[in-house]
Amino acid sequence: MRKLLILLLATLAPAPALAANQVALDNSVFVERVTTDASGKQRVLLEEPKVVVPGDRLVFVLNYRNAGGEPADKFVITNPMPSAVRFAGAGDASPIVSVDGGKAWGALDTLSVIQPDGTRRPAQPADVTHIRWAFQKPIPAGGSGKVMFRGVVK
Amino acid sequence: MPGAKDQHLESKIMVKAPVGGARHHTLLLPSSTVALAVALMTPMPAQAAGTLAGTTISNTASASFDNGSGNQTINSNTVDMRVDEVLDVVVADQATDVPTTPGATNQVLTYRVTNTGNGPEAFALGTIANVGGDDYDPVVAQIYIDANNNGTYDAGTDTLYVAGSESALQPDATMTVFVLATTPGSVADGNRGIVTLVAAAKTGTGAPGTAFAGLGEGGGDAIVGSTGADGQDNGNFLVSAATVSLVKSATIVDPFGGSEPVPGAIITYTITATVAGSGSVSGLAINDNIPADTAYVAGSITLGGSPLTDAADADAGDFNGTRIHIGLGTVAGGQTRTVTFRTRIN
């Protein structure tokens, strides 16, 4: 029996293992399971999957916490896309992405991909290889937060 | 609001190889770095079937920061998910109508069976010949698998399908299946006969979402996909037959300018062969014996108004002393052939 959690509850209960430097990053992945109840209403449940199938919609949540005594400056979170997952957006807090394995970065609509014939085409979500959140302000001592993105199992 | 560029951090991006030892792990390169190198050389193959069953998807993020003692990088925990096997199959008939003729044997219908699931799967094959919606039931003799993948049935080369000894079809792979059938002799021109080929996953079929615990590739579950893990399509035979009708008529011209059958009168026979139907007849020939008490008028055979010689030679007609013969060969439906010859009443 898998444990069903709604996203809100899940994100309120991060359990990062604190590293020696007192900054922790906790990674959770949920799959959206759509169920239909007796009255025909659809409910989306977020479930922590052990197994997935192609087409499953995943929500990746990264909780960060600075438990140290000093602010963490130049804070950057990078998540390489698993190769079997297609990027499907990151909500309002649009991160910068890379479509070339981490060499060039930018908003998705500013990037392009070289095609086999040498020409370039605009990058698509499926091209994303890395996602990055670069924080402009330091994370204060004791500060925490989360970022998320979505993906679909290829 | 994020968005700043920290170019100096790029070399610290962590690309962590996933853990897990699924059997087909190496088929889907798990490292983003390696996968990208491949992607730049050749476009990513279209993954109709999706990620291979048994693959482990691993996600690890990293964070870099400076809390006063220089740049540091930490990794998050790694989340692993195993990709379960989805059972899906699509069957597609390869021709709109396959022409056949009454009584013909080893008539071939061609289908393509594609494993649209994400794991290797064997499919049981079966046929339904009495589906309805047609004019007759083809008699299915055998099912063959295209052993040399040339899309054409090759007797003696292709593999006879034996239920229970199916071999696995790889994900995204397609096999060509031939159904050999006999067309009943009683069918008529324009009749249609349907044979349905059914392919069903050996692991199991059912409503989409049905799970077969532990039967998936790599020890996971096998889950019925949107196709129900079975598929079928109709192959159509269209009977193309032709019938021949012969009409023979005679006109008499007597030596006195009349039309009386008196000695010395010349009888002109006209034989019209009419071929009807959507098919054609081959080897059509007209033979007619010269009636008793009459004598053939030498050199009088015509075909379509053109004279033919009496010798058995390159032209279509000859007279051998007792009968005339005109070989018409293959004549398509809708065409007629008119032959005339003359005799004299003794």
Image: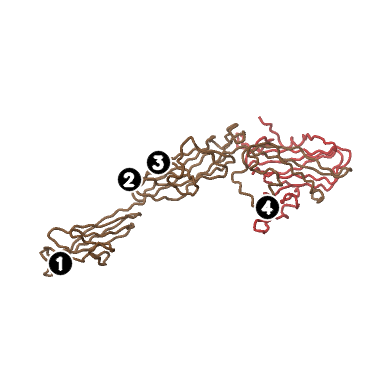
Chain colours: A red, B brown
Which chain is indicated by disc 4? Answer: B
Query: Both on one chain, marks 3 and 4?
Result: yes
Give the quadrant of the C terminus of chain B. Answer: bottom left
Q: Quadrant of residue A13?
A: top right
Q: Looking at the picture, how far across and down is residue A60, in whole percent?
A: 72, 41
Query: Both on one chain, marks 3 and 2?
Result: yes
The image's mark for residue B40 is 4
- Pick whichever, B31 or B232, lies toward us: B31
What residue sits right under mark 3 in the picture?
Answer: B141
Instruction: Identify which residue is drawn at 63% across, 39% down.
Output: B24
Q: CA distance from mark 4 to mark 1?
A: 91 Å
Q: Secondary structure at mark 1?
A: strand
Q: Secondary structure at mark 4?
A: helix
The image's mark for residue B290 is none
Dot 2: few (<14), some (14–19), or many (≥20) neighbours within 10 Å? few
Label 2 with label 4: CB-CB less than 8 Å = no
Q: CA distance from mark 3 to mark 2?
A: 15 Å
Q: Mark 2: which amino acid? A: Gly
How many numbered tags mark residues here? 4
Instruction: Identify which residue is drawn at 76% across, 48% down.
Output: A95
Q: Closer to the observer: label 2 or label 4? A: 4
Q: CA distance from mark 3 to mark 4?
A: 50 Å
What residue sits right under mark 2 in the picture?
Answer: B185
Dot 3: few (<14), some (14–19), or many (≥20) neighbours within 10 Å? few
Which chain is indicated by disc 1? Answer: B
Dot 1: few (<14), some (14–19), or many (≥20) neighbours within 10 Å? some
Which chain is indicated by disc 3? Answer: B
What residue sits right under mark 1 in the picture?
Answer: B253
Q: Secondary structure at mark 2?
A: loop
Q: Is residue B202 left or right of residue A12?
A: left
Q: CA distance from mark 1 to mark 3?
A: 60 Å
Q: Quadrant of residue B293?
A: bottom left
